[in-house]
Amino acid sequence: MDTQVIKPYVIGLDLGGTNSVFGIVDSRGEIKATTAIKTQGYDKVDDYVDACVAALQPIIEEVGGLDKIKAMGIGAPNGNYYNGTIEFAPNLAWAHDGVVPLAKMFSERLNDLPVALTNDANAAAVGEMIYGVARGMKNFIVLTLGTGVGSGIVINGQLVYGHDGFAGELGHVIMRRENGRSCGCGRTGCLEAYCSATGVARTAREFLANSDEPSLLRDMKAEDITSLDVSIAAGKGDKLALRVYKFTGDMLGEACADFAAFSSPEAFIFFGGLTKAGDLIMKPIQESYEAHALKIFKGKPKFLISGLDGSSAAVLGASAVGWEI
Amino acid sequence: MDTQVIKPYVIGLDLGGTNSVFGIVDSRGEIKATTAIKTQGYDKVDDYVDACVAALQPIIEEVGGLDKIKAMGIGAPNGNYYNGTIEFAPNLAWAHDGVVPLAKMFSERLNDLPVALTNDANAAAVGEMIYGVARGMKNFIVLTLGTGVGSGIVINGQLVYGHDGFAGELGHVIMRRENGRSCGCGRTGCLEAYCSATGVARTAREFLANSDEPSLLRDMKAEDITSLDVSIAAGKGDKLALRVYKFTGDMLGEACADFAAFSSPEAFIFFGGLTKAGDLIMKPIQESYEAHALKIFKGKPKFLISGLDGSSAAVLGASAVGWEI
């Protein structure tokens, strides 16, 4: 008989610029206990990690103690899987100008629990593979459409980290080499500058400025328009808002045609706020892909929306990284 | 004591549209025996494979018989690794409108020898990993600059075949989305339309037509110019020819910046005729990469020329696929 203690849970930490959300998750993706603290307000990383561990104690007890926990997974901006570090993360006071060994710091405070860390889009990809729509798939690409555009790439059943741990920045392939929009990365024409939530709002403002077409979006100040407003207007049949989705989907489809030439995935999986528009965004993506893909890749990949529950998707993704250790 | 027969060799077959070149190769990449037949002149694939096996017999005997051979690797256009098939290869009379199980056919005629098959660019990548400049590397991309632009991508030490076996068509990512050159694939703006040998000749003709700049290339008919002529002129310091290399290298560097965002490789390795220009092409590639790459990828990858000997590189690449079985 196996005398090893059964460890049925992993801890997931979705480390965002504003909140740090924890979940204790079983192997089927059920969240057994959850808690959260503010990410901001800690100048020193030691104080931040101490506060995290203090918040974790009661929920660890709730599931039967640390003995029941197999590992911890962290999804964090600028997370480097190879080193377990966060590197030069602009939105984190204690990591914006250095390299922080966060995985090791958690492990030391949690009785040498194995801790793995990666960026949030990679965590989403592992989450889809373990609990979501990519179960059983060996080759797929997750594109996260949020404030930015992130990606997690799985090839031969493994997440692609590349030589340095930073592979999978598909939000920063260049889609417009001439007169491209400025991007937060300092360059121009990146996919993210068009197809993130902020990119969608920019497209709407551009369309409003370049035409006299009537639109519900003209009822508000141009600078206040968000992707949510575009989504609401599109839901009411607003033609200009629908054109914004068509434009966004067209570009994502073109980008996916190039990505297929790279890794020929079984599926492209879309994650994040923009996917709430459903067919308004997914149909243009798929049609544009079919129009632009190299002949041998036409009709092959699936185009899917994330199978992870929206509100807890990021925590589930982070926890999934723990199962992979 | 191990009673297994030692099998120190593999057979490599570089299957081209014109010639089929065979080599028997040891584990250090030394070619022990070689032969070749014409690829053309066989309407039926059975006749072609019979002729191959007849040509192979004497060189197999030369190295001590089939017992000394571990496996066979084939590099072929439109080769599918997963099935060992050649699929719809336009330049092969017996495979241009169907799926041919070539690996199985060779295996049956060679006493059930294990036979693997992949496309020529993938074979080049495996060749670099086993005998060439990528020894010890786990993440790299080979770009073959010949009549077309091919690619072989290695991630986590494994060649990327994708869900269908056809991944790694980086010659067909789109570099010019507006007014792009027509490509043999039926689309426009592909990397291959600019950076293949034929693309380089097209660039030279374009530059000659669009300026009055004096050039050695004006001494010949525009339609007769090949990439070799451009290379000879550049070697003599011809400014227009040098601009052609700069243009080609600039675009390859931009493309590599996008590829880094995908798999962040340790090295980009260039293979094929165009690399004979040495620094004339490699310097613009690297400078353009550094100018265009996302900040976190700047200064990281190496830019290398293939380490496989030119005349036998394709056979070595094919043979390397045999060692990987």
Image (cartoon, coloured by chain):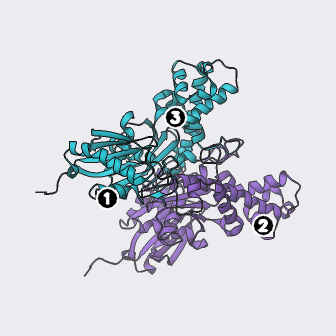
Chain colours: A purple, B cyan
Disc 1 target residue: B108
Which quarter shows the N terminus of chain B? bottom left
The residue type indicated by label 1 comes to Glu
Q: CA distance from mark 3 to mark 2?
A: 45 Å
Disc 2 target residue: A234
Q: Give the chain letter at badge 1.
A: B
Q: Which mark is residue A41?
A: none
Report the residue at 75% width, 66% height from top: A231
Q: Give the chain letter at badge 2.
A: A
SS at badge 3 = helix
User: Is A49 on the left or on the right of B51, as rendered?
Assistant: right
- Disc 1: CA contacts within 10 A as few (<14), some (14-19) or many (>=20): few
Q: CA distance from mark 3 to mark 1?
A: 47 Å
Percent of width and height locating residue B68: 21, 49
The residue type indicated by label 2 comes to Ala
SS at badge 1 = helix
Front one among A295 and A116: A295
Residue A56 showing in the rendered view: yes
Q: Nearer the viewer, mark 2 or mark 1?
A: 1
Q: Vertically, is A261 above or below B283?
A: below
Dividing the picture into quarters, in which one does residue A245 lie? bottom right
- Disc 2: CA contacts within 10 A as few (<14), some (14-19) or many (>=20): many
SS at badge 2 = helix
Q: Are marks 3 and 1 on the same chain?
A: yes
Q: CA distance from mark 2 to mark 1?
A: 61 Å
Report the residue at 78% width, 57% height from top: A204
Q: Vertically, is B189 above or below A17?
A: above
Disc 3 target residue: B286
N-terminal-most mark, 3 or 1: 1
